[in-house]
Amino acid sequence: MSALLRPTPAQMTRRLIVLACAIFAVVVAQVQMGLGLGQTAAEFAADSDATLKVAGYAFAIWGVIYLGLLVYAVRQALPATGESVLLNRLGWPSAVALLGIGWWIVAAALDWESGTILLIFGSLLVLLIPLLMNAAAIRALSRTSRERWTVVWPLALLAGWLGIAAPVNLLTVLTGNGDLPAILAPTVWALIVVGLVTAKALAVTWVLRTPAFALPIAWGLLGVFNAEQARNGVLAGGAVVAAGVTLVGAVILGFRLKPPVDRLAGAPERGL
């Protein structure tokens, strides 16, 4: 929970920068798609997807993610919104991540492969690490907390999608350049990625006690299942099992288990 503290001028500056970064991330993507400048995210992923393919419709999740990010960015920018622990600690990391996903669109459009890897993994880490470091504050939020729904969920949804998109991005580049290590078959590499992202989804959900991180990963795994059914039954089967495990695990860990008793002492939840 978070105390209602009016933001200082320096904090308002940070908030406005976060808002500007969110607008940048959304506008860049819309301009790229609207004007057809270079490759879209789906086209970039499909360029060298012989190892692991994701159905194009799966990328529609960006619409939900962008909407959530705008809700987060607008609300935190309002002067009437109290300066909470989470807003303070996640503000700058979210700004960097928003810049990162915006520039990733540019890098993908230009087919700058190494740039896409650096940007997507950097955006994931700069957001996920602070979320995990502030897990106690996140768990302390009530189920109906506005901060849970307007801060934690938008940022965790973004981190979750990056959590599956980053390894897919890496496999795409390695496959396209012929750099995928031959020590294992491509299907084995793809199944390893599927297993790792599933384990990561459940581990993060266990720590944060929110399914927001895992849901985009389950969605992406279903996209792998649908895309691979016709060409790689083993991979499709592994992906759909992983999606089911991720989804069920997210619900149980996020809603069924009681959060640990570690609420922040003396911090009544208030704010806009």
Image (cartoon, helix red, strand yellow):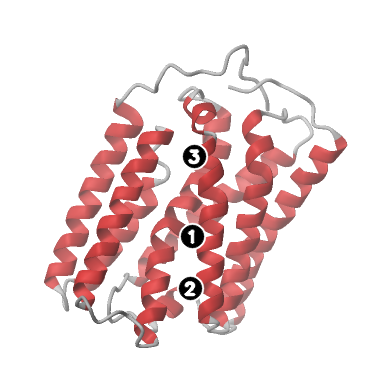
Mark 2 vs mark 1, CA separation in Å: 10 Å
Mark toward the start of the polypeptide (3 vs 1): 1
How packed mark 3 is, by other alpha carbons closer than 10 Å (few <14, some 14-19, many 20 or more), is some
> Where is residue 127 shown, x and y percent of the image?
55, 49
Mark 3 vs mark 2, CA separation in Å: 27 Å
Quadrant assignment, res 265: top right
Q: Secondary structure at mark 2?
A: helix
The residue identified by callout 2 is 41
The residue identified by callout 1 is 62
- Front residue of 153 and 95: 95
| Left or right of 255 in this view: 69 | right
Q: Secondary structure at mark 3?
A: helix
Q: Residue at x 42, y 71 (%)?
A: 169
Mark toward the start of the polypeptide (3 vs 2): 2
Viewer-side label of 3, 2: 3
State if disc 1 and disc 2 touch (CB < 8 Å). Answer: yes
- Front residue of 234 and 78: 234
The residue identified by callout 3 is 132
The amino acid type of the residue labelled 1 equals Trp
- Front residue of 272 and 103: 103
Image quadrant in which the C terminus is located: top right
Q: Residue at x 76, y 29 (%)?
A: 80
> Where is residue 208 shown, x and y percent of the image?
43, 35
The amino acid type of the residue labelled 3 equals Leu
Q: Residue at x 29, y 59 (%)?
A: 221
